[in-house]
Image: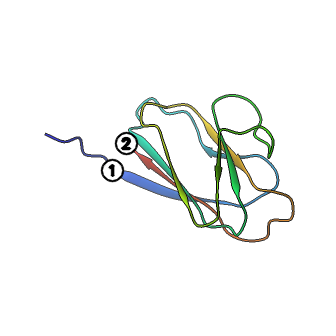
Amino acid sequence: MPTTYDGTTTTVAASSSPQTLTVANDMRGGLIISNSSTMTLYVLVGQGTVSTSFYSYAVPTQKSLEVPFTYVGAVSGIWPANVADGGANVTVLV
């Protein structure tokens, strides 16, 4: 029988300062991050401070990222300077 998850979506406003997209959660079954900004979202999976030069994934505008379902740690993101719109829609599956 397939595994069934409930999803909760939150929005994180775009910022040129590091933002927590989601905290660590041992119960997380999946994570989907959608970039609704007109600028690239830089995502760091793991420890450290995300920047436009230190990141795990670059998510283009209007695109989504499925973080590997085995990862349950914190995820952070940042947009380039002067971003003025959109953000990240973060769906956590538990």
Q: Looking at the image, which residue is at 81% across and 41% down?
A: 53
Q: Looking at the image, which residue is at 64% across and 59% down?
A: 60
Colour convention: rainbow
Pointers 2 and 1 in contact (C-beta within 8 Å)? yes
Q: Which mark is residue 65?
A: none
Q: Nearer the viewer, residue 1 or 65?
A: 65
Q: Looking at the image, which residue is at 82% across and 55% down?
A: 16
Q: Is residue 79 left or right of residue 90?
A: right
Residue placed furthest toward the right: 82
The amino acid beneath tag 1 is Asp
Q: Residue 19 in the image: x percent, y percent?
A: 72, 48
Q: Residue 76 in the image: x percent, y percent?
A: 67, 42
Q: Which residue is mark 2?
A: 94
Counting residues from the N terminus, which is met first, the one under dot 2 or under dot 1? 1
Kindly state the secondary structure of the residue where label 1 is placed. loop
Q: Is residue 24 left or right of residue 58?
A: left
Determine whether 72 is above or below 15 in the image.
above
Determine whether 1 is above or below 65 in the image.
above
Q: Residue 33 in the image: x percent, y percent?
A: 54, 53
Q: Residue 5 in the image: x percent, y percent?
A: 30, 46
The amino acid beneath tag 2 is Val
Kindly state the secondary structure of the residue where label 2 is placed. loop
Q: Which residue is mark 1?
A: 6
Q: CA distance from mark 2 to mark 1?
A: 5 Å
Q: Nearer the viewer, residue 7 or 78?
A: 78
